[in-house]
Amino acid sequence: MVQQDQRLGGLVGVQLSAMMFWQFFLWGAWYMTMGPYMNAVGMSDKVQGWAYSMGPIAAIVSPFFLGIFADRYFATEKILGILHLVGGGLLLFAPMAAEQSELLYLAVILVHMLSYMPTLGLTNTLAMHNMTNAEKQFPLIRVFGTIGWIVAGFAISWLNYDKSPGMFYVAGGAGLVLGVYSFTLPHTPPPAKGQDFSARDAIGMDALSLMKNRSFVVFAFCSFLICIPLAAYYALAGRFVGDMGIEEIAQTMSYGQISEVAFMVVMPLFFARLGVKWMLAVGMLAWVARYGLFAQAADEQVRMMVLGGIVLHGICYDFFFVTGQIYTDQVSGPKIRGQAQGFLVLITQGLGMLIGTQLSLKLVGHFTTITADEVKVVDWKSVWSYPAGFSLVVLIVFVLLFKNNKAAQATPESESAD
């Protein structure tokens, strides 16, 4: 056991940290700036909406892929390598596809996301399998993923690729590097080898037993709803930052990940004082404040308000999503813990983000006018007012209805009579 701990701090620790770095460098190099790129090459709002819907669609599909193939038949490091080689190659092809047709471009983005989304779970599985104390060791490894996203943002802006096809070449190249590198990672056998696949397990149907817990129902419903306005940030913020006259779009957006690291460090202190309910509420309130700042900054292009809204990402993500994962872990118990977390991802990153992405781009289209010179002008103040108002309503509903009955956490049924 001691020897394993030393290995994790040595070669294995370095291997896993590098894996996380490249995993999120790859994503951060293109995802937030894809919107400005598509806008620059003249793609319609409808196409942009579908491009940003491919991630949520892949998030819905990936549990089935993991359950049928990755968890049962192949070593984790091998399937991780294959998926990244395929996904990296597709990103390299994306600019050429965009020149051919919008439909081909969307197909490339879809297949890439179908390749990429399962790797988020695979990297976690591989890392935790090679740890002796995942609770303590995993956060130290995972933080290198956030660092990778930050470095990618700065690199794209430094290369002046914020609106150019170059972002796809950087990301695709990183994907190929990670694909090859994955084959050198510690051997990790399929965790569910020999077990029958169950669609019920893949989508977390057993986690529906938590619906006997009224507060979990409120939490799940509000999590789903809050991801609808959240989608506007990922789909529109990069484009908004560019319209505000900020040239270093990728670098500016990465300030959100820098704040994420900072707030993750102090999060335990806030958690001890606020508890689950008010941590979640503060996270929702940060979304209201973020979109409010964006709306107020729009007309006069107030740079500090734009930056303030981006920096709030640390509270938006850490206080809500991380706290939500902790709360779900508390109420679910060991037998359905994995399914409960999968169910949460399905309704938030999958369904909530998919609906939100489609609505946000329709919102932009509604508030876009074309000048006599055929230039698109977006009324960003009106656009951001809608997700701000929506988030505020969800916050109010949550505060009024959610109760964190600590005594009932281990037995969800006991709260059903509240």
Image (spheres, rainbow, N blue to C red):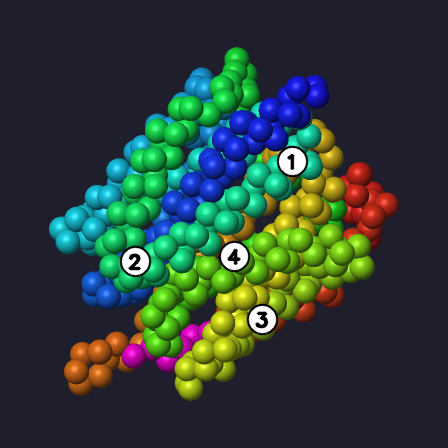
Q: Is residue 343 visible?
A: no
Q: Nearer the viewer, residue 377 or 25?
A: 25
Question: Label 3 belongs to which residue?
Answer: 288
- Tell me the residue at 69%/45% (across/down): 326
The amino acid type, in three-letter code, at marker 1 is: Gln
Is disc 1 placed on a helix, strand or loop?
helix
How far apart are the alpha carbons under marks 1 and 2?
34 Å
- Label for residue 159? 2
The amino acid type, in three-letter code, at marker 4 is: Gln
| Tag 4–tag 3 contact (CB < 8 Å) | no
Sequence-wise, the earlier of marks 3 and 2 is 2
Magenta span covers which residues? Answer: 377-384
Sequence-wise, the earlier of marks 1 and 3 is 1
- Tell me the residue at 38%/45% (across/down): 26
Q: Where is 117 relative to 353, above or below?
A: above
Nearer to us: label 4 or label 3: 4
Residue 110 image point, x, y percent: 32, 44
On the picture, is 305 further left or further right than 39? right
The amino acid type, in three-letter code, at marker 3 is: Val
On the picture, is 29 further left or further right than 220? left
Residue 33 image point, x, y percent: 35, 59
Q: Nearer the viewer, residue 25 or 367?
A: 25
The amino acid type, in three-letter code, at marker 2 is: Leu
Question: Label 4 belongs to which residue?
Answer: 257
Sequence-wise, the earlier of marks 4 and 3 is 4
For the N terminus, give its image quadrant: top right
Q: Nearer the viewer, residue 76 or 392?
A: 76
Residue 400 colored in magenta in the image: no
Residue 378 colored in magenta in the image: yes
